[in-house]
Image (spheres, rainbow, N blue to C red):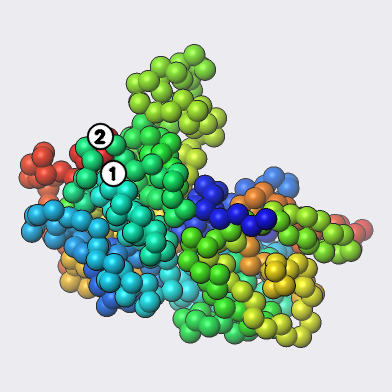
């Protein structure tokens, strides 16, 4: 069972995508629910709003604890939340990715764009369509960060051991490689170790 | 090759606003209060609907200076309204790079027959509706988000409920129809056939559907979410109340925890007086904002 943080944002698109992959999921709004899920999606939305709701509903520590043992897939606002440092003081960073990130760094909505990018994931290169919507930019990469994809030289997809962070929205283009890699893989490993 | 301004990108931003509250603001101070309370976007306008109602006169798009000040002060998306059919006002807002344009019945219409051809713009548009036909005409013109009209500035949720239920019931009917019946339905509703077909197939609007027009309390927000709205606009309900900051925050919480009645008790407790509101029958028919739009 995969949890999708459902405080604000496009969590329903992630749930639809996971369903298509045959992965069951649940909307997460309370700390206790994190004990029942094997992975977590931090969806896009407004990072300052989601951050505030995380803090006010006592989810900050539980999500950080969760990240120490289980995988998180973060898109757009989600990767801002998972960073070490942002340029917006209203976002309380979870400090899971050792990166510095600037919010809404390509400009307002009129500068949002769709482009094709090359992703190197687990030894396979694939070409995917990515939607960047009022997207953030990763400004500094710290320790243990593997870059999976860049756009015009800027990292747009990263990984650190069990987590993946994206500055774009694969779920808007029905792109399943990240969800499938992080969460189906996990399922297989669980089955193997159970055997 | 990077592509900008496509319909998918417009709908994409609307997707990101889901589960949030969009708040009407009249100046920078209100925009800051809204942002601090957790607004997912602000709608910059010169007078909130309740004041337009009180003061009368022609309601137009806002002064670019006021919109610019708000854009400079908040980091969330900034939306602004234009008069129905006034594509020149929309061109100005697009040049200012507002994030979303509301072609709104709250302002005095500039064209009594035609809405703006919204596909011509790179900035996304939201439009109001009272039923499915109206929603599909606006989507046909290029709207990337639909909201119920409700009755703006009334503080009375009854019209928003009526419009949300109407849209849902119209959709439900379509999903049970044979293909032969769909053309007649398209004709009766005055909606483009291709969109009628699409809605019949997917069982919902092809763009996000938000609620507006009359939300004044956290319970109003919960009601609209439970009726199928994906986000809530609050116009006069916040800044016509006695406690804008706490009320705005409470409505934000209500949109996240709308199904949790125990939490709704907590959220609704200790607020001061909500806006007074008006009984719809007290508003003369020719002054009802929802009648505007074609």
**Please, which chain is the residue tagged with disc 1 on?**
B
Residue lying at 10% horizontally and 40% vertically, measured from the top left: B286
Which residue is outermost to the top? B180
* CB atoms of marks 2 and 1 within 8 Å: yes
Q: Quadrant of residue B173?
A: top left
Q: Quadrant of residue A163?
A: bottom right
Of residues B265 and B271, the one drawn nearer to the viewer in this rendering: B271
Q: Is residue A143 above or below residue B66?
A: below
Q: Secondary structure at mark 1?
A: loop
- Per the image, the residue denoted by label 1 is B85
Assess disc 2: are there few (<14), some (14-19) or many (≥20) residues with their C-alpha within 10 Å of its C-alpha. Answer: few
Residue lying at 45% horizontally and 18% vertically, measured from the top left: B183
On-image quarter of the N terminus of chain B = bottom right
- Per the image, the residue denoted by label 2 is B113
Of residues B68 and A49, the one drawn nearer to the viewer in this rendering: B68
Label whose residue precedes the other's in the sequence (2 or 1): 1
Of residues B156 and B52, the one drawn nearer to the viewer in this rendering: B52
Residue B128 left/right relative to A85: left
Can residue A123 be seen here? The reply is: yes
Instruction: Give how far apart the Cα atoms at labels 2 and 1 are.
Output: 8 Å
x, y percent for residue B234: 29, 59
**Please, which chain is the residue tagged with disc 2 on?**
B
x, y percent for residue B98: 39, 63
Q: Is residue B217 above or below residue B272?
A: above
């Amino acid at each position: 069972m995969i949890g999708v943080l459902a405080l604000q944002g496009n969590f329903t698109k992630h749930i639809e995508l996971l369903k298509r992959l045959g992965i069951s999921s649940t909307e997460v709004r309370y700390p206790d629910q994190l004990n029942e899920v094997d992975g977590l999606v931090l969806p896009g939305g407004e990072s300052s709003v989601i951050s505030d709701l995380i803090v006010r509903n006592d989810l900050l520590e539980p999500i950080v604890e969760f990240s120490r043992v289980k995988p998180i897939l973060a898109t757009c606002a989600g990767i801002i939340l998972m960073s070490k440092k942002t340029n917006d003081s209203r976002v309380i960073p979870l400090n899971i990715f050792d990166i510095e990130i600037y919010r809404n760094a390509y400009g307002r909505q009129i500068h949002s764009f769709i482009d094709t990018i090359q992703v190197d994931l687990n030894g396979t290169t694939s070409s995917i369509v990515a939607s960047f919507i009022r997207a953030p930019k990763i400004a500094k990469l710290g320790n243990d960060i593997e870059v999976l994809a860049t756009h015009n030289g800027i990292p747009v997809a990263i990984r650190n051991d069990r987590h993946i962070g994206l500055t774009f929205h694969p779920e808007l283009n029905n792109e399943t490689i990240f969800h499938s890699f992080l969460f189906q893989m996990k399922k297989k490993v669980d089955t193997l170790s159970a055997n | 090759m990077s592509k900008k301004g496509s319909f998918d990108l417009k709908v994409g931003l609307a997707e990101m606003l889901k589960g949030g509250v969009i708040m009407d603001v009249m100046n920078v101070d209100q925009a800051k209060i809204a942002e601090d309370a957790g607004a997912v976007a602000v709608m910059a306008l010169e007078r909130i609907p309740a004041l337009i109602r009180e003061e009368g006169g022609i309601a137009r798009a806002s002064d670019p200076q006021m919109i610019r000040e708000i854009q400079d002060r908040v980091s969330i998306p900034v939306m602004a309204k234009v008069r129905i059919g006034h594509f020149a006002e929309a061109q100005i807002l697009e040049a200012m790079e507002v994030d979303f344009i509301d072609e709104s019945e709250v302002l005095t219409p500039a064209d009594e027959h035609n809405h703006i051809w919204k596909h011509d713009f790179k900035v996304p548009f939201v439009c109001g509706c009272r039923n499915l036909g109206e929603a599909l005409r606006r989507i046909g013109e290029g709207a990337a988000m639909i909201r119920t009209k409700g009755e703006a500035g009334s503080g009375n949720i009854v019209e928003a409920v009526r419009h949300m239920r109407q849209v849902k019931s119209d959709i439900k009917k379509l999903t049970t129809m044979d293909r032969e019946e769909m053309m007649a339905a398209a004709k009766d509703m005055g909606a483009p056939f291709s969109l009628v077909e699409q809605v019949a197939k997917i069982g919902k609007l092809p763009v996000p559907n938000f609620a507006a027009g009359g939300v004044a309390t956290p319970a109003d927000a919960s009601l609209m979410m439970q009726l199928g709205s994906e986000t809530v606009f609050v116009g006069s309900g916040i800044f016509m109340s006695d406690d804008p900051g706490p009320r705005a925050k409470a409505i934000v919480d209500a949109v996240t925890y709308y199904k949790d009645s125990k939490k709704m008790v907590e959220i609704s407790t200790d607020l001061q007086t909500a806006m007074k509101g008006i009984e719809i029958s007290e508003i003369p028919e020719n002054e009802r904002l929802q009648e505007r739009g074609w």
